[in-house]
Image (spheres, grey):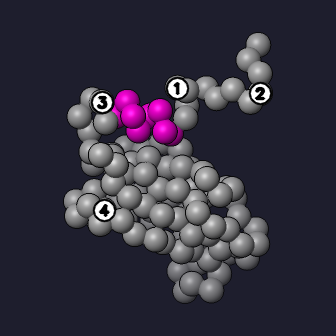
Amino acid sequence: MKPAAMLDESRDPLFIAEEWMESGKIVAIATVVETWGSAPRPVGSHLVIDADGNFHGSVSGGCVEGAVISEAADILETGRPKMLEFGVADETAWQVGLSCGGRIKVYVERLG
C-alpha cells in the first residue's frame, strides 16, 4: 500500500501536462492562486487543458471549469496569460458555480 503522501503520477495534472507536451500538444495550466471564504478547491490546485479542449484536474468544479477552459483556448492561441477571478461579487457568480459565498483567483498560462 502506498503512503498517503505519495502522488499517483498517472492522475497528477502536472504529470499529465508533461506527457501531453512530450507528445507534441500545446498545453495551458490553470492554478488556483488565492481563495476567500468557501472555495471548493485549495490554493495550488491545477487544471491542464490542451488545444483540442481535453482537460485534466480541477480548479473548482462545475461551471467554473468550463469558464476556465474557455479562457484557456484564447491563452493557448495568443500565449498571453490571464488572472481570472470568480465569486459572488461577480455578476456571473451564479453562472459559474460560486454562489456559495466564496471567491477564487485562477492564473492561466501556456506552457512550453
Q: Earlier in the sequence, mark 1 or mark 4?
A: 1
Could you say whether the residue bearing mark 2 is in a helix, strand or loop? loop
- For the point 43% across and 61% down, the residue is 108
As drawn, the label of residue 4 is 2
Residue picked out by circle 3: 22
Label 3 to label 4, Cα distance in Å?
Answer: 20 Å
Q: In the picture, which quadrant includes the N terminus? A: top right
Q: Earlier in the sequence, mark 2 or mark 3?
A: 2
Per the image, is 19 magenta? yes
In contact (CB < 8 Å): disc 3 and disc 4:
no
As drawn, the label of residue 10 is 1
Number of residues whose C-alpha sits closer than 10 Å to that of mark 2, classed few (under 14), some (14–19) or many (20 or more): few
Compared to 47, does 33 lie above or below? below
Residue range of the region highlighted in magenta in the rendering: 13-20
As drawn, the label of residue 24 is none
Q: Residue furthest front?
A: 112
Residue picked out by circle 4: 75
Q: Quadrant of residue 12?
A: top right
Could you say whether the residue bearing mark 3 is in a helix, strand or loop? helix
